[in-house]
Image: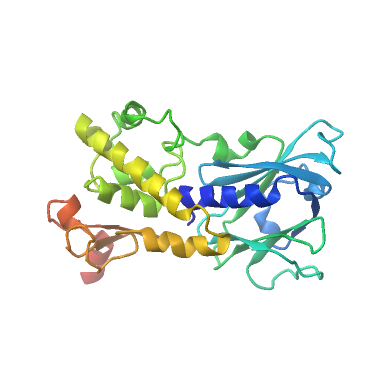
Amino acid sequence: MPELPEVEALREFLAERLTGRTVQRVLPVAISVLKTYDPPLDALEGRAFTGVVRHGKFLDLALGGTHGEDRPPDGEDLHLVVHLARAGWLRWQDALPAAPPRPGKGPLALRVVLAGEPAEGFDLTEAGTHKRLAVYLVRDPDQVPGVARLGPDPLSPAFDRAALAALLAGQRHRVKGLLRDQSVVSGIGNAYSDEILHAAKMSPFRLAADLSAEEVGSLHTALREVLTTAVERARGLSAAELKAGKRLGLRVHGRAGEPCPVCGDTVRSVSFSDSALEYCPTCQTGGKPLADRRLSRLLK
């Protein structure tokens, strides 16, 4: 799943290519991807992109006036808001085919065609059978439920140690789950929560309420350093390069069975119904492996 660093890199990539460009056509291929119906998608045609903003893991493509005007006749801007979910992605096309795409053929979910020759634009695609890619066309991004409930952005200057301490205070939940909770902190998913906890030398099973002030400080430092480094690593990569770039930068997530790059111990995994976490016992749990209940049930 794309997380804050990859979505931020996509934001910069799209802002450079879309700002000032006019929409010629929007072609929904998988109807299930569109989560709103008013305004209709064809309301985008003739409007120009005015900028791209990130809200957590959401991309917000803002559009203003029609046919080069500063404002549309009704005085309302529109926002094409995208959540890529687990298997969604964005593919930039320098030259789109003239023929419209056929529904039901491949992973293509939605195509945006820009005015001009050759016709540039981008495709939203989704692999697999679990269709969770979501597109919203709204007048205000807060009309998207997932955006409205977002917690603070962890890269905001206002997100200091005191802000993190306030969010964690009294929380009888595991710190791993809280880092992934978008209503607590926005933009962090399974991969970067593993990386942050490894950098902080903290067990993913620690209860947030039990963390000392020093541990909260270490967690904040790790959070900022891991995300900032990942954003810098992703910056400048094309949309096609971001997935591989993310994988190369991860130390423990997705690397079960490999040596920890810090201490050399074997990275271990705990499996859940639809995901897994990775950690280093020596760095994070005093050398003690965490119980993997799913594996334990299989061995009975």
Answer left or right for 2 relative to 273: right
Please tell me which residue is depicted at 65% across the width and 72% down the height of the picture: 106
Q: Whole-percent x and y of residue 79?
A: 69, 41
Please tell me which residue is depicted at 34% across the width and 31% down the height of the picture: 164
Q: Quadrant of residue 140?
A: top right
Please tell me which residue is depicted at 45% across the width and 49% down the height of the picture: 231
Camera sees residue 145: yes
**Up/down of 292 relative to 202, above or below:** below
Looking at this view, name the residue that lies furthest to the left: 287
Camera sees residue 212: no
Looking at this view, name the residue that lies furthest to the front: 236
Q: Whole-percent x and y of residue 43?
A: 81, 45
Q: Whole-percent x and y of residue 239?
A: 57, 60
Looking at this view, name the residue that lies furthest to the bottom: 105
Q: Nearer the viewer, residue 243 or 108?
A: 243
Q: How many marks?
A: 0
Q: Nearer the viewer, residue 261 or 106?
A: 261
Answer left or right for 263 relative to 160: left
Please tell me which residue is depicted at 52% across the width and 58% down the height of the picture: 237
**Up/down of 160 relative to 155, above or below:** above
Q: Quadrant of the C terminus?
A: bottom left
Judging from the image, the colouring scheme is rainbow
Answer left or right for 145 relative to 4: right
Q: Whole-percent x and y of residue 192?
A: 37, 51
